[in-house]
Amino acid sequence: MYKNIFLFMTVQLSLLSHVQANDMQDHNSHNHSIGHVHMDVDGSKSKIDPDKYKNFIKGLSAGQVAIIDVKGMVCDFCARGIEKTFYDDKEVKKVSVDLGIGKVLVAYSKLKKIDVDEIKNIFLINGQTATKVIINQL
Amino acid sequence: MRYAYNIPPMGIFKKAFISGTFLFISGIVIARPISWSGGSTFMYKSNFMYTSYYYHFSPTYKYSVGFEIIDDKHFKDEYINLRSTILLDRKNTKESQRNLYLTGAISTKTEDNFQYGIHGDWETRRIFTSFAYINKHTDTKDFTENEFQLGFAPYVGEYNDLHTWMMFKTKRDTINNDWQTYPFIKFFKGDFLIELGTKDSHWDIHYMIRF
């Protein structure tokens, strides 16, 4: 029995280190390509329901809103970790998940320097894929 | 002012390391066997074969480790399994997610008690399908469990709504050696999920909370 437990623990530690190394590799491999920034003046690609968006920013006097396109966010359970992780950031004021169009809205304070890599990583560690981020200044 | 950042697709998950070497140590079948990075899950499951209490922790979204207390009704036995699940492959699209897991466990009872298998699912907001193939080894008998699930959502709920799934499960184990098919219903809201099904007066209950 103890032999089994020892073997189990050894393999778990090996797996953990390997998976974490793999995550780092996934993350680092995109760092250079994310710096590309372009303007999306009218926001037409975001297809956010204007009423939902107005409702979301209601009461937010100043700050920034990240509109994030997500792949793989097909169920409520899938999005739970995303919401929890964003709220760990004290500069995040509000999070809204729209499963129907696969988008997440995140309202930050105006002090927050938004890092797209950081946003992407939040989705990565929750098992989804962020494909596009639009940032609106309020 | 508005800025847009296009993010290229994620790199392909390098799964070469998950080889047959690890096959014998990985876990069992349950929907969403891995949580988000740093997330924990508690599950209670009861059917005519066993009752189990299972806790797992996910250091990353690709891997979970935990323990399961089993009350084996068939073999009239109680023991603890150390379980692990590895995400072999995941494909995210705008409308769906597909997963393939390697799962396994070893028992604290004897060296001869262990199990391993694979589990896969594909899910949209309307349709859910899954399969599982598990080999279980005990000191008295070895057997295999197969399971397929198919379900649909009668309505598509928004985030934070109560979600409902009408499901069918068909499963077989090589001890009883017959396929059992029965409907069950799945509800989830927030961090809670419950599944209820019945077949020949036996209840199949599954409760899950994530935190």
Image: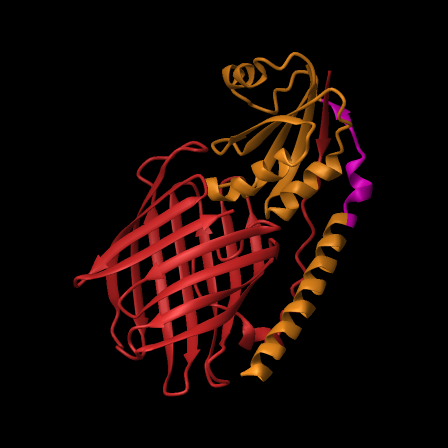
Nearer to me, B55 or A133: B55
Provide the residue span drawn in magenta. Answer: A28-39
Q: Is residue B6 left or right of residue A46?
A: right
Q: Is residue B197 left or right of residue B127?
A: left
Q: Height in image: B27 above or below A104?
A: below
- The residue that appears at 76% across and 25% down in the rendered structure is A38
Q: Residue B49, position in %: x, y?
A: 30, 70
Q: Which chain is red?
A: B
> For residue B125, what is the image quadrant?
top left
- The residue that appears at 28% across and 59% down in the rendered structure is B204
Q: Is residue B197 visible?
A: yes
Q: Height in image: B83 above or below A137?
A: below
- The residue that appears at 63% across and 69% down in the rendered structure is A12
The quadrant in which the N terminus of chain B is found is top right
> For residue B155, what is the image quadrant?
top left
Q: Is residue B16 visible?
A: no
Q: Residue A105, position in %: x, y?
A: 59, 27
- The residue that appears at 56% across and 23% down in the rendered structure is A47
Q: Residue B180, position in %: x, y?
A: 25, 66
Q: How did the renderer colour the structure?
A: by chain
Of all residues, the one furthest to the bottom in this rendering is: B140
Q: Which chain is orange?
A: A
Q: Residue B25, position in %: x, y?
A: 55, 74
Q: Height in image: B29 above or below B157?
A: below
Q: Height in image: B49 above or below A82?
A: below
Residue B155 magenta-drawn?
A: no
> For residue B181, what is the image quadrant?
bottom left
Residue A35 magenta-drawn?
A: yes
